[in-house]
Amino acid sequence: MIPSKDQVLEALSSVQEPDLKKSIVELDLVGDFVFSEDMVAFSVKVHNPAMHNRKKMEEACEFAIQRFISKDIRVKADVITLPQDRNPEQRKVLPGVKNIIAISSGKGGVGKSTVTSNLAVGLAQQGYSVGLIDADIYGPSMPLMFDVMDEKPTTIDVEGKNYIKPIENYGVKMLSIGFFADANQAIVWRGPMASKALRQMFIDTYWGSLDYLLIDLPPGTGDIHLSLVQTVPVTGAVVVTTPQGIALADAKKGVGMFKLENINVPVLGIVENMAYFTPAELPDNKYFIFGKEGGVKLAEQLGVSLLGQIPLIQSICESGEAGRPAILQETTPQAEAFKSIVKAVEKATEIRNKTMEPTKLVKML
């Protein structure tokens, strides 16, 4: 009697992928079935390619089929390694996260963290499940911007292992090195220590299922950026700049880093912050204090999208320092500007996922 595919899948549903801790059937790791009178052959994908792991998987599959179907069936399991461009559910790191978005800037002081905090809250307002990692190790600002300066992360037990539980406010789960250090304490770490701290925020934290995980990167292009693309497959990057020439020059380098052949992270677009100033008493006037449409021209020059322009308004800074992102101010011009950027990022991510292959991890640089 030749077993059916459904019978084999039901039998194999008892076999777990040892690193991902879920059934190989649930994770859709079994395929390429070949059936004969006394033999079942198929392929199984595994996270760890080591020889002893492949051998254990072969034995587990054979035991399951012979136990639940028939001892007379020969089993040939071709165990192969999971590709890097795997589905989120098949990842060991951040298995429940659909989109990982890096927010970057070429230089400091352009409002990258302000954009990140408002984008996170805006996505949560749209009904998405959102997480945020403050990867600016040396200058963490998210605890202040989300009014959670005095909060301390706790731990949560998941399947017998302790994980860090993120802090949550405004519908956004977040983690920052700022939660683990005194507000007045300088973080003086070499690159490897900072990179290790970043990996812990990915690996040792229970994020659960998320539609978006935003990563607020430090300015420039350094160790943290490389650690990020080596640890998780980044769906896309958003680059923040101001219209000033010096900011644009550094933003151009930031876009160039993501476009490097051995990094190859899609750039979703550019956000131009402090694009113009409009005084409250002259609402129809625009004063281009730092230059006119520098971000617009840079986006055109680099062939990437302009996700939006944010006006220079004092209350944006005040809102961040008060721990209440400006996007929460309902119908104000600044809230509308951030909401427009939220929609643009949402659309750019959707197009990216429909038209491009999943991002691959960077192996070595």
Image: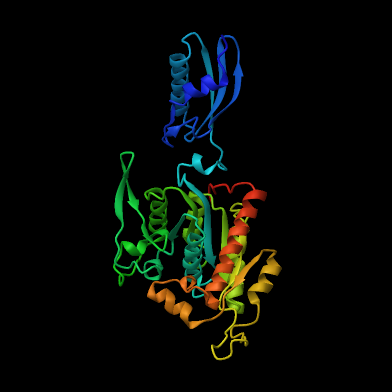
In this picture the colour scheme is rainbow
- Front one among 16 and 104: 16
- Front one among 193 and 138: 138
Vertical arrangement, residue 29 with respect to residue 269, above or below:
above
Residue 110, image x, y percentages:
52, 74
Q: How many labels does the image show?
A: 0
Residue 130, image x, y percentages:
46, 56
Q: Quadrant of the N terminus?
A: top right
Q: In which image quadrant can residue 290 be found?
A: bottom right
Can residue 106 be seen from the camera position used here?
Answer: no
* Relative to 203, 222 lies left or right: right
Vertical arrangement, residue 43 with respect to residue 122, above or below:
above
Q: In which image quadrant can residue 53 be found?
A: top left
Residue at the far bottom in the pictured view: 281
* Relative to 208, 186 lies left or right: left
Residue at image position (31%, 61%) is 180
Q: In which image quadrant can residue 278 be found?
A: bottom right
- Front one among 224 and 155: 155
* Relative to 230, 137 lies left or right: left
Residue at the far front in the pictured view: 331
Residue at image position (52%, 63%) is 103
Vertical arrangement, residue 237 with respect to residue 182, above or below:
above
Residue at image position (49%, 8%) is 72
Residue at image position (39%, 61%) is 190
Residue 29, image x, y percentages:
53, 32
Can residue 8 be seen from the camera position used here?
Answer: yes
Residue 177, image x, y percentages:
36, 61
